[in-house]
Amino acid sequence: MKTDLDTLLTALYVKIDDELGGQRCLGRPPRLTDSELVCLGVAQAMLGFRSEARWLRYAGKNLTSMFPYLPKQPGWNKRLRAALPLVKKAIRMLAADTDFWFDNHWIVDSTPVECGRSRPTVKRSDLAGWAGYGYCASRSRFFWGLRLYLVCTPAGMPILWALANPKMDEREVLQAMLDVDARLVADRPGLLIISDKVASKEFETDLALRGIELLRPSFKREKKRQGQSLLKSVRQLIESVNDTLKGQLDLEQHGGRTFEGVAVRVAQRILAMASAIWHNHKTGAPITRSLVAYDH
């Protein structure tokens, strides 16, 4: 099987249509099905089109053989925002269809998702009250927006993800994520979570009650913890997952201006990464988190 964008979209369409594609009971069926919509969203993220207008012009010239009908920009935007639940299900479905789903080693990290810079934008934005000011340590500057919390396997396959106000405590966000999908933890005895940020005695106690072990850096005033050599080798892996989302999938240039718009555009990029990992795994590609074959 060839590893290219057309092959990926074909396999993804069949997978989503067979397992998630539902039939509408009322009204006239849409000319662009939900499965086609999600595949087009993945292609947009893969090819790096930040502008919806430019993307629809490109797709109208180059992808009509696979997608005969394309809506106008207002219809595309409306359909994409309404497809957020389907995109979330697709991410989980692809993750569960790989061997990575059964990995009992999880990596936890968060990264800023900037939504505005000017003060007037902050005041007038529909995201006011949901987004907030936070600090980006990697760039040594403050930002206004959200934080993306991602729990993934060492291969980069997303397991859990959430968007939260950057002022919220990272431990509280992770605990809430584990509470929502408590069955995931229960089905994985001996689960190890690796993080280079999240740490406190209360938090570790809570994880221990869930049957989870936390691997983190040692504090300055505590004895050296076990597994520190493993943590050093994993830190680069944690950063590389975020680099895939930001560098190759343009996470920071999402273009969302509303709650639904930001959420679905972030989910769109997570799904694109999950789709590439899923397809590379199925085709036996040597590097599972490589997007090179799909970004042109």
Image (cartoon, rainbow, N blue to C red):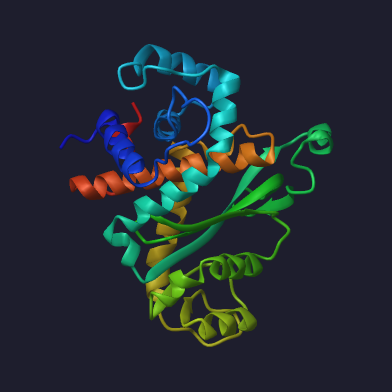
**Left or right: 275, with 132 as reference point:** left
Instruction: Identify which residue, 241 or 73, lies in the foreground.
Output: 73
Residue 283 horizontal/vertical position (percent): 19, 45
On screen, residue 46 above or below 187: above
Residue at the farthest top position:
61
Task: Locate the C terminus by quadrant.
Answer: top left
* Residue farthest along the left direction in this orientation: 1
Q: Is residue 289 visible?
A: no
Residue at 68%, 34% (x, y): give it. 257
Which quadrant is the N terminus positioned in?
Answer: top left
**Among the 4 quarters of the image, the one containing residue 84:** top right
Residue 15 drawn at (x, y percent): 31, 43
Would residue 106 appear left or right of 265 to someone viewing this image? left
Please report the residue visible at 47 percent of the width from the left and 36 percent of the height from the top. 24
Extreme residue toward the front, this view: 26
Residue at point 71%, 45% (across, down): 143
Q: Is residue 131 visible?
A: yes
Residue 103 placed where, x, y %? 33, 67
Q: In this view, does 163 lie above or below 253?
A: below
Report whether 266 appears left or right of 48: right
Q: Locate residue 295, reporting x and y percent.
A: 35, 30
Instruction: Name the residue rendered at 51%, 81% in the picture.
Output: 210
Q: Nearer the viewer, residue 75 or 257?
A: 75
